[in-house]
Image: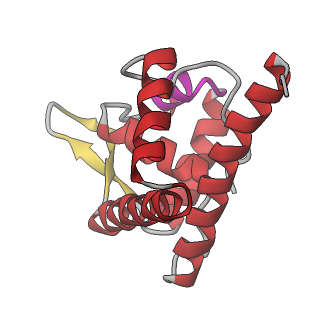
């Protein structure tokens, strides 16, 4: 049975959604019921140097206002904080808090568990082959956080 290119895209998207939805549900079971995928992307961008709303907006391809809303949510929940810039006391820089880093560690562990579940379902060799084929098709860095329009823009 031959599939269309659109079918392939939907299968890939479905795999992504399946993993992300399962990870989000497991994080909720572990006490992080207030987390959304965009929060992970935002914290990863902050770790990589997006230390203000303008820069976070650029990296996530959202408006400064949407980035500011995401920052406010993350700050309210204790995942990020604003610290005084050592070079300019008038400026506040974003930092991921220890709670934010713990959330990220939990998320990584959950994705490892989900990968193991997939491996059990289809086999070690098949999953390794799937990963190798996907890496060959999409390259070493399959997703860029600054790719316009693919991230949900809901800050809640």
**Depicted 16 relative to depicted 88: above or below:** below
Scheme by which the image is coloured? secondary structure
On the image, which quarter does residue 89 sit in?
Answer: top left
Does the stretch in magenta take in 58? yes
- Which residue is farthest left? 86
Which residue: 32% across, 67% down?
102
Residue 153 visible:
no
- Please state the horizontal and vertical placement of residue 91, each as a whole percent of the image: 32, 36
Principal secondary structure, stretch drawn in magenta: helix
The boundaries of the magenta stretch are 54-62
**Depicted 35 relative to depicted 41: above or below:** below
**Depicted 150 relative to depicted 35: above or below:** above
Please identify the quadrant where the N terminus is shown. top right
* Left or right of 108, for residue 148: right
Which residue: 61% across, 70% down?
34
**25 or 96, which is in the foreground?**
25
**109 or 121, which is in the foreground?**
121
- Please state the horizontal and vertical placement of residue 2, each as a whole percent of the image: 84, 22
**Depicted 129 relative to depicted 63: above or below:** below
């Amino acid at each position: 049975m031959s599939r269309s290119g659109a079918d392939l895209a939907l299968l890939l998207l479905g795999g992504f959604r399946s993993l992300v939805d399962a990870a989000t549900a497991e994080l909720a079971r572990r006490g992080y019921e207030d987390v959304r995928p965009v929060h992970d992307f935002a914290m990863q961008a902050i770790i990589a140097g997006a230390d203000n709303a303008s820069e976070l907006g650029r990296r996530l391809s959202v408006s400064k206002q949407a980035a500011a809303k995401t920052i406010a949510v993350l700050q309210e929940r204790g995942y990020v904080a604003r610290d005084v810039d050592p070079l300019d006391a008038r400026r506040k820089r974003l930092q991921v808090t220890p709670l934010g880093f713990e959330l990220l560690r939990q998320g990584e562990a959950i994705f490892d568990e989900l990968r193991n579940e997939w491996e059990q379902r289809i086999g070690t060799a098949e999953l390794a082959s799937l990963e190798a084929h996907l890496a060959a098709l999409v390259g070493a860095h399959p997703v860029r956080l600054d790719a316009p329009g693919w991230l949900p823009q809901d800050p809640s």
